[in-house]
Structure formats: C-alpha cells, structure tokens
Amino acid sequence: MRSQRGFEAVCEQIRQQVFRGELRPGDRLPGERELAEQLAVSRSVVREAIRSLESMGVVESRMGAHGGIYIRTSTPHGITQAMSDMVALAQMPIAVVTETRIELTCTAIRLACERATEAEFDAIEADIEHHAELFRKGQGSRNARSLHRFYHLLAQATHNELMVMLVDAVSEVMRMILLRIDPQPHPDMVAVRRKVLRHLRARDAAGASDAMRVHLHHLTAYLEAESKT
C-alpha cells in the first residue's frame, strides 16, 4: 500500500477483486471501518477510494435499511463520463467521437444481420414509428434519451454485452454534443432509420451500413461546421 497513494492502492485492490470474480455485481462491500482495518489504511483513505470508484462507475451508494456501498451492475456510466469530460475539455475532438460512432454502428449492423431475431427487428421498428409519431406532433427533441434508443436496440440485436455498453456510451456523448449545438433533430432521421431497418430485415449488412454511414457522415460535417461558428 505504501508504494503508491493509499486511496489508489485501495481502488486497485477492489478493482482486481472484481476482475478475478471475487466481488460480483450486487455484492456489498464491508463498512468503512472494517475495510480500513482489512487493508491497513485510514478511514479517510477508504472514503477517498470509494468516491473515486463511484466516479468510475465501479461501485454505487445505496440508502435505506439495506444501504451501503455495492459493486455496480455493468453500465456505460464510467466510459460516458470519461469521454464527456475529454470532449468538454477539448482533449477529444468531436470528429473522433463521430468517427467512433460510425465504426461501432456499422460493426453492430454487421453482427445484428447475423444474429438478430425478427422480434428484435420488430422492436426497432416500433421505436422508429414511435419517434415518427412524435415528429408528426412536433414533439421531437434531442433532450430525450429515448431518441438514441434505436442505437441501443441495434446493439442489443448483436447479442454482445460489451457492444451494448460501448454503443450506449458513445450515443450518450453524442446526445450531449447535439443538444448543445442543435436541440432539434432532423425529421430525415426517421426515413434513414426505416431504410436501415429494411436492409437489416433483408440481412443486407452492406446496404444497411452504407445508409447509416451516409447519414452519420452528413451529421459529422454539420456538427464540425456548427462547432466552429
């Protein structure tokens, strides 16, 4: 513990326990005093380590009768926060985020064409029609996280949990960028998603990817132009 800052050593030890499967999602950590005794550090070091692990999305605090610090179930929170901070601090260009989104989405399309069920395609279609109805009512808004549910459902159709986490993280960062630059999504989005879905149902990965690439490249060009104004 003395070879590095105490709280960093505590963080690393808990992360290694998670990695080895000794701690699993939903497991409750010992109390602050017990953990400090186990690791031979002060309670303030444990407190700082828990704050750091919370910010990384490794653990979460729960209140109530069964309150305490628990190992968090898998979420893209930590990835999303890291990317958002880098974009906000101009350490990661918007072009890098959009390029990553394009490549991730096209990979998801390829895997979905191989693995998705018709029920999963039906869920994507229902989501598209839901937002088409919102547009008809003049209620489309980038402020709604549900606007990116299309990408979440597409990622789920890959049957790859890590792909879902990565797509969700990048989608949330893009949502925040778009909300800051232009709060109103373009109605053409619905037509593009319908076209992509038609190719998905035909198991035509190339056609679906081409349609999505064109749409996202146009969006990238728009964002880069708007961010300079």
Image (spheres, rainbow, N blue to C red):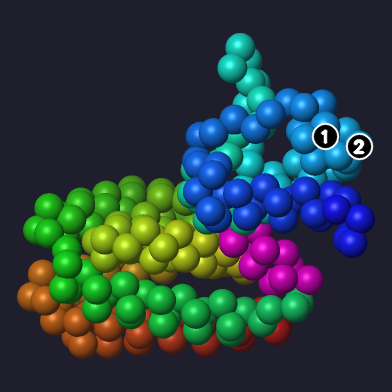
In the rendered image, residue 76, in percent from the top left (x then y), is placed at 52, 56
Which residue is located at x 18 percent, y 56 percent?
Answer: 120
Q: Examine the rendered structure and indicate whether residue 157 appears above or below residue 192.
A: above
Residue that label 1 marks: 36
**Relative to the observer, which residue lies in front, 182 or 211?**
211
Which residue corresponds to the image point at 51% horizontal and 67% vertical from the top-left?
A: 170
Tell me the magenta residue range. Answer: 79-89
The residue where tag 2 is placed is 42
Q: What is the quadrant of residue 205 in the picture?
A: bottom left
Q: Is residue 159 left or right of residue 201?
A: right
Q: Local crowd at mark 2 within 10 Å, few (<14), some, or many (≥20)?
A: some
Left or right relative to 56: residue 193: left
Is 216 rendered above or below residue 33?
Answer: below
- Mark identifier at residue 81: none
User: Residue 201: x percent and y percent?
Assistant: 10, 70
On screen, residue 172 versus residue 14, left or right, reads: left
Mark 1 crowd level (few <14, some 14–19, many ≥20, 10 Å Cα) = some
The CA distance from mark 2 to mark 1 is: 6 Å
Amino acid type at image mark 2: Ser
